[in-house]
Image (cartoon, helix red, strand yellow):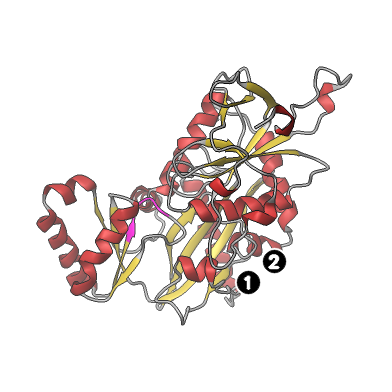
Amino acid sequence: MSSENLPQSPERAESPEPHRRKPRVAVVFGGRSSEHGISVVTAGAVMKAIDRTKYDVLPIGITSDGRWALTADDPERMAIADRRVPDVAQLTESAEGSVALSVDPGSREVFYSEPGSVPKALGEVDVVFPVLHGPYGEDGTLQGLLELSGVPYVGAGVLASAVGQDKEYMKRVFSSYGLPVGPYEVVRPREWDGDRAAARKRIVDFAGEHGWPLFVKPARGGSSMGISKVEDLSGLDEAIEEARRHDPKFLVESLLRGREIECGVLEFEDGPRASVPAEIPPVTAHDFYDFEAKYIDSAAGLVPAPLTKEQTAEVQRLAVAAFEAVSCEGLVRADFFLTEDGGFVVNEINTLPGFTPISMYPRMWQESGVSYPELVDRLIQAALSRSTGLR
């Protein structure tokens, strides 16, 4: 890549008033998880919504093999096309060039280098907007790097990100705070590899207690990737292998009969507030609300959800309580089941929920009076005002 094609550093040396430059937002997306493609889609929507009169934008894509790369600032190329999700490799400016963030907390410099060339400083980054989903991004790993670098970032910190990604510990934290969770069984890699027959028997016993069907899912995944609905014993082994393709630790959950309700939480100056809730209606073309239903076939949610005033207030209360229980910051989408007996059960939270044009989180806030661009701006401003480190 020639130097003239590189993003230009802020003109701080030549400017008589350098403090008046626009804050620089690095949108980091892609990553090594199985949610790579949907992260690219999310990033495209976020980049399109960022007010370019207020902020400079530096798009940084992480390839599937972990290389940080400069990418084209071209949101139109980051959308789903022909039922296929995009890939960072299609957007990179160079097949070999890489981006690095300084881990010196006294510097927020970003550097670009290619093999055999001297690294080039691209200027400072004021805030990172991470839109990575799943492991190696949403799970506290990227957040830890940014803490070391002293760079503010949108969303939850290291602990909240890690707990929010790991469904086992998420449920344990919720239970300790008295929040209702459904029956589940966890199988760790050592248990499965050490005594598969014993681990499988635990699952069969769980099914005997709670009944079929069951859901088998990766413990640290999202976007419904790797999840299978298992109707009986004959489909169990295949479902376990599918889950383990995404994560060697997996969960088994019982079917909760009822309605799927979601609620967004956003941090305001006076604390977290809940959006109007949404309902995911039964998806007739799919066994459940899986990846294709969410992103490919654009299954429509009902916003606001047709709930009573009392039900709406209760799910909003629980959503904020879940946010607080995990010590979240910035934003969360909380997912619930409204069971047949009229009670709510917390299914999970997402600390970096999807921001695609059809994603439920921005739709719920749109209905609550916060437009997509306002939502993005509020998250950036909140991150800029928050320090890194212990807080």
State the quadrant of the C terminus.
top right
Q: Residue at x 50, y 42 (%)?
A: 63
Any part of residue 45 in sight: no
Amino acid type of the residue that numbered disc 2 sits on in the rendered structure: Glu
Q: Is residue 355 above or below residue 146?
A: below
SS assignment for the magenta stretch, majority:
loop
Q: Residues within 10 Å of mark 2 (few under 14, many from 20)?
A: some
**Mark 2 residue element:** helix
Q: Is residue 14 left or right of residue 291?
A: right
Q: Is residue 196 left or right of residue 240?
A: left
* Front residue of 97 and 192: 97
Q: Is residue 220 within the magenta segment? A: yes
Q: How crowded is mark 1: few (under 14 residues within 10 Å), some or many (20 or more)?
A: some
* Residue projecting furthest to the right: 16
Q: How far apart are marks 2 and 1 (CA)?
A: 7 Å
> Which residue is under mark 1?
303
Q: Can you tell which mark lies on residue 90?
A: none
> Which residue is under mark 2?
367
Query: Quarter of the image holding residue 229?
Result: bottom left
Amino acid type of the residue that numbered disc 1 sits on in the rendered structure: Val
Q: Do the residues labelled 2 and 1 touch (CB within 8 Å)?
A: yes
